[in-house]
Image (cartoon, rainbow, N blue to C red):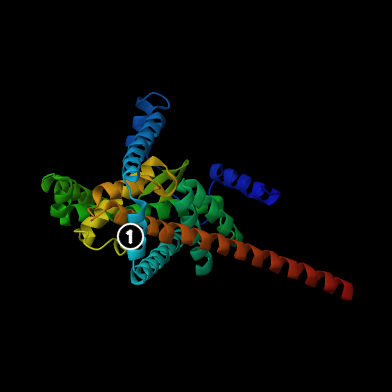
Amino acid sequence: MTPRDNDLMNELVNDLTDAPPPGLPVVRRQSPGGFFDVLRQRLPKGALSVLGVAASLAVFGLAAYVLGTTLSNLRYADLLTAFRATSAAQILKALALSALSYLFLTGYDVIALRHMRARAPYRVAALASFASYAISFNLGFPVITSAAVRYWIYSRVALSALQVANITVFAGVTFWLGMTLMMGVGFVYGASALAALDGAPAFVHVIPGVLILAGVLLYFVWVTIERRSIKLRGHALELPGFVPTVAQFALGVADLCCASGALYVLLPQGVPLDFIPFVAVYIVACILGVISHAPGGIGVFEATMLHAVPAASQESLLASLLLFRVIYYFIPFIVALALLGADEGARRWATLRGAIARIVEERSN
């Protein structure tokens, strides 16, 4: 780590503990407690952390068992045949939908900046959003990795670490709003299809779907009728009102549909699952991947999809999942690293040119 990186990290730590800068829409007074605060106080110290680790290990262990069992029964000749059976049109559609998904992701940062009344050119916001997601999707620990990438980029336009932290939280809320809404829709609309997959009665899917949609509606009404805020490391972040919340839902749903659509178009022929119930399965797999803390949900996501999605053969479905992993995760990761390198090179070149120009001017005088 260079001295400049050390300075940036020190500033990040200091800004998170200092008072927020003027102009940031922060509400100072916040009602104490809340469900999780009360829960932390009543449980033994460290109990929630232990439970979280246990849940992550349980999910990862179960996924490893399912994936290991599946791989042990694979015929690799059939897997290669499945790769060859994937058409160029399917790959192009997946690439296009992946690009649209990342384009919608840039909107997360744009509406966050507008809500916070912070200024940054779209090219800066787009680079920060795209790079932070492309890197965090592959490395895992999104709160840390995405915030670090965003801070590295946004610090150039004089945004503080606290503002970057607020942008990261705002973007995370947008992502989960889209996930939650589409999960509720998928459970209700695709209840019959999901029941055919797991053998449970349709109402077993309808009931949680209705509850999820009711929760989404309550959240929407809650943030619309009055200005609300949530605590972030001792600071209170103002939640958006009606128009920004609608934009959050729209962007979250659009991003999720494009991301899941990129996998859907790669599925082998004959998968008896419509798009909406497929999205519900996709979201469950993503959530389990997040819980496991595996980078990009790797292994856990694939195991869930292999277990839940009906296909003519496990080899054909695994080929689709591996292609999706390359298209949606690996290629954007490489592009993000290249863009960050090019951007940093351009900045250093501009600094060098400025220094040379000053030296020439001084000598000419």
The reply, left or right, for residue 220 in relation to residue 9 is left
Residue 140 shows in the view: yes
What amino acid does circle 1 point to?
Ala
Residue positioned 21% across, 62% down in the render: 270
- In percent of width and height, residue 357 lies at 79, 72
Residue positioned 50% across, 46% down in the render: 144
- Front residue of this view, candidates 186 and 118: 186
For label 1, the crowd category at 10 Å Cα-Cα, with few meaning under 14, some 14 to 19 and many 20 or more, is: some
Q: Residue furthest bottom?
A: 364
- Front residue of this view, candidates 355 and 160: 355
- Against 164, is 269 above or below? below
The reply, left or right, for residue 146 in relation to residue 306 is right
- In percent of width and height, residue 66 lies at 31, 41
Q: Residue furthest front?
A: 77
The reply, left or right, for residue 42 in relation to residue 25 is left
* Element on which disc 1 rests: helix
- In percent of width and height, residue 365 lies at 89, 75
The reply, left or right, for residue 154 in relation to residue 65 is right
Q: How many marks?
A: 1
- In percent of width and height, residue 76 lies at 36, 52
The residue to which callout 1 is attached is 82
Q: Hey, which quadrant is residue 16 in on the image? A: top right
Residue positioned 65% across, 50% down in the render: 5
